[in-house]
Amino acid sequence: MLVPITKKSALIVVDMQKDFCSSGSLPVPGCDELIPKINALIKTFKSLGLPVIFSRDWHPPNHSSFKDFGGVWPPHCIQGTEGAEFHEDLEIPEGSIIISKGASPERDAYSAFDGTELHYLLSLRNVRRVFVCGVATDYCVKETALDALRLGYEVIVIEDAAAPVSVDGGRKALKEILRFGGIIAESREVVTY
Ligand code: VGL
Ligand code: ZN
């Protein structure tokens, strides 16, 4: 099914940071391979004058999601470190919105809406439809998409421009997004108006 990028659309690129790619501390399989597809999407949204949002995991060194502090993950995306930087091949246009999340030590934030100004910034720009890509399909992409649905946005997850930590987890996440009213599309199905 074709899904149009309407005038009230925005692109949300979730957590395309070094630590989640092949050289990082918590590599998501297939993360590097998403770059060309995501860059193409960025270019399309940019050329239409539509908002492009980049979220980033932005943890303090003692974050509660880290194994040494009672969590389940190896240390990753620590504020100001190289691992927290965006992938060097990601093309971030000037004027993009960068959303940092997970910055308080005691709680995690998988969703780009969790504890951030994202909803406010999208509302200001009259955005009704969000296209979501990035990593990880079964964690931050999923929670961002589900929050966007709860907030009343039309949500399209671009399946081939997102990658999961586990294949099974990714499948379950997409099913859940569908169940709550989201759309799952391939990037070739995302068309301009
Ligand atoms: C993520 C695990 C831990 C993600 C963030 O971006 O999906 N996953 N922190
Ligand atoms: Zn994290």
Image (tube, helix red, strand yellow):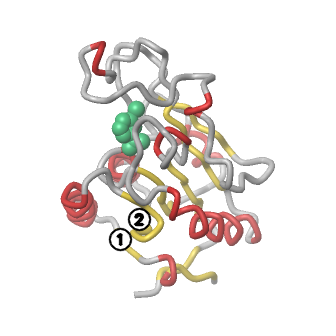
Say which mark, if any, is on residue 183. 1
Q: Amino acid at mark 2?
A: Val
**Residue 93, horizontal then vertical, whole percent:** 76, 54
Q: Secondary structure at mark 2?
A: strand
Is there a contact, CB below 8 Å, between mark 1 and mark 2? yes
Dot 1 or dot 2, earlier in sequence:
2
From the viewer's side, name the closer residue of 167 and 94.
Answer: 167
From the viewer's side, name the closer residue of 72 and 149.
Answer: 72
Say which mark, if any, is on residue 157. 2
Which image quarter holds the C terminus? bottom right
Q: Is mark 2 within 8 Å of ligand 1?
A: no
Q: Is mark 1 within 8 Å of ligand 1?
A: no
Q: Is residue 147 above or below residue 6?
A: above
The residue mark sitting in front, 1 or 2, is 2
- Position of 97 with respect to 101 (left or right) is right
Q: CA distance from mark 1 to mark 2?
A: 6 Å
Q: Dividing the image into four equal quarters, which quarter contains ligand 2?
A: top left
Other residues around mark 2 within 10 Å, as few (<14) / some (14–19) / many (≥20): many
Residue drawn at x 39%, y 17% as measured from the top left: 63
Residue drawn at x 47%, y 14% as measured from the top left: 61
Q: Amino acid at mark 1?
A: Ile
